[in-house]
């Protein structure tokens, strides 16, 4: 299959890698050249790690050869699958979906990796809403097993079954969920991240001790402040805003500290500083 992934940031490069590992020809596109360069390095490092552990049957070079890194989204014309993985902003996603309409085949599947934006709302911008759904990967995509397949009212059973099958072929575990704010994972995760940030604002403990408590006391692989940095504080903030707008529940209200850090450009790992420095 030919697969085009739009957006090569935190998620897009890992998604492209997963599809390439699955034997697909992948076009990975971004509007920012240095992001594409970084994506190339991230994928190379990740493949080396997987290769050393014997988790891939091909050499890293064989997998890498299937990925085209390009600033030109038009290189993705005629793909079987499109995965939109650009920033969590409705207006930008709308533009990209309209661009994909011009390049896609009648039966191409168009998927969005959105963390929180309504699939039904976004389906209004695609020509064939029956072929549109959420294919929600988790960070880092080469490691995390889950894919939330998010269905809109007009998503066809055929498209869902196809993505379920493809997800399994990629070595992932799909779950099918309805278009509800935050779907399942982020609905559950965001109150945890929010509560940790509020505890930090209130001075309950140092950031390190908040993270240590959750890691060692609750056995999470990362502390919540570390995880928010890993996800990206902008993404975390945007997702909380959608959840708060839609549920109106204070459990999702974005903390002011988070807003201030995002406005100041401290976005976590991807900018080198968030709750921690990298
Ligand atoms: N590519 C390949 N392998 C990788 C990798 C990558 N990008 N990142 C980590 N690994 C591998 C390592 O090689 C290592 O393998 P072994 O255990 O076999 O040695 C393993 O993963 C663990 O890696 P590390 O020792 O480097 O670091 P770690 O133990 O801290 O694990 C982690 C890293 C897998 C990211 C782990 O910390 C973790 O699971 N963190 C939580 C991640 C999480 O919750 N993600 C979901 C975020 S929410 C989301 O994605 C949804 C949304 O919409 C916001
Ligand atoms: P990111 O900020 O790391 O990367 C987004 C990339 O999109 C940037 O490199 C940017 O240059 C690019 N971009 C912006 N406009 C573009 C355009 N018009 N054409 C091509 N590229 C464009 O963001 P991310 O964390 O990778 O998030 C991407 C999507 O995945 C979002 O919808 C987010 O909610 C979702 N998501 C994120 C995570 C996470 O942990 N970060 C997990 C699951 C899902």
Image (tube, rainbow, N blue to C red):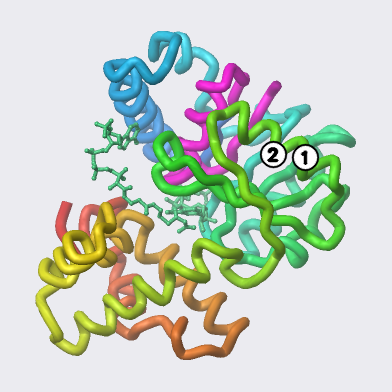
**Mark 1, secondary structure of its residue:** helix
User: Does mark 1 have its CB less than 8 Å from ligand 2?
Assistant: no
Q: Is residue 11 magenta?
A: yes
State the SS at label 2.
Answer: helix
Question: In this orientation, which residue lies closer to the viewer: 65 or 31?
Answer: 65
User: Percent position (x, y) of residue 259?
Assistant: 36, 78
Q: Say the numbered circle drawn on residue 260.
A: none
Confirm or deny contact between disc 1 and disc 2 (CB under 8 A).
Answer: yes
Residue 161, image x and y in percent?
77, 40
Residue 140 relative to residue 167: left or right? left
Is 90 in front, or is 186? 186
Magenta stretch bounds: 1-26
Determine crowd level at label 1: few under 14, some 14-19, many 20+ residues with C-alpha closer than 10 A.
few
Is 22 situated left or right of 98 in this image? left
Q: Is residue 138 left or right of residue 228?
A: right
Residue 148 makes an appearance in the image: yes
Q: In the figure, 93 relative to 247: above or below?
A: above
Whether residue 53 appears in magenta in the rendering, the answer is no
Disc 2: CA contacts within 10 A as few (<14), some (14-19) or many (>=20): many
Decide if residue 274 is in sight here: no
Residue holding disc 1: 161
Whole-percent x, y for residue 105 in the image = 84, 33
The residue positioned 36% from the left and 73% from the top of the image is 192
Residue at which label 2 appears: 164
**Which residue shows up at 59% across the image and 25% down it?**
26
């Amino acid at each position: 299959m030919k697969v085009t992934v739009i957006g090569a940031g935190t998620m897009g490069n890992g998604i492209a890698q997963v599809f390439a590992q699955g034997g697909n020809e992948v076009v990975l596109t971004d509007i920012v050249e240095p992001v594409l360069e970084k994506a190339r390095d991230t994928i190379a490092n990740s493949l080396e790690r997987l290769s050393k552990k014997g988790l891939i049957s091909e050499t890293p070079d064989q997998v890498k050869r299937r990925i085209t890194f390009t600033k030109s989204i038009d290189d993705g014309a005629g793909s079987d699958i499109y995965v939109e993985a650009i920033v969590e902003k409705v207006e930008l996603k709308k533009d990209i979906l309209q661009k994909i309409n011009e390049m896609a085949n009648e039966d191409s599947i168009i998927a969005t990796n959105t963390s929180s934006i309504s699939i039904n709302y976004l389906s209004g911008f695609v020509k064939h809403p029956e072929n549109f759904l959420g294919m929600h990967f988790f960070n880092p995509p080469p490691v995390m097993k889950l894919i939330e397949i998010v269905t809109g009212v007009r998503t066809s059973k055929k498209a869902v079954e196809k993505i379920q099958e493809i997800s399994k072929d990629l070595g992932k575990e799909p779950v099918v969920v309805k278009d509800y704010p935050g779907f399942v994972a982020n609905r559950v995760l965001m109150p945890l991240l929010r509560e940790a940030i509020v505890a930090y604002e209130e001075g309950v403990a140092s950031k390190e001790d908040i993270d240590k408590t959750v890691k060692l006391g609750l056995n999470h692989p990362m502390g919540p402040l570390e995880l928010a940095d890993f996800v990206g504080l902008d993404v975390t903030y945007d997702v909380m805003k959608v959840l708060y707008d839609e549920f109106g529940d204070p459990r999702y209200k974005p903390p002011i500290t988070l807003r201030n850090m995002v406005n100041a450009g401290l976005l976590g790992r991807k900018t080198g500083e968030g709750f921690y420095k990298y």
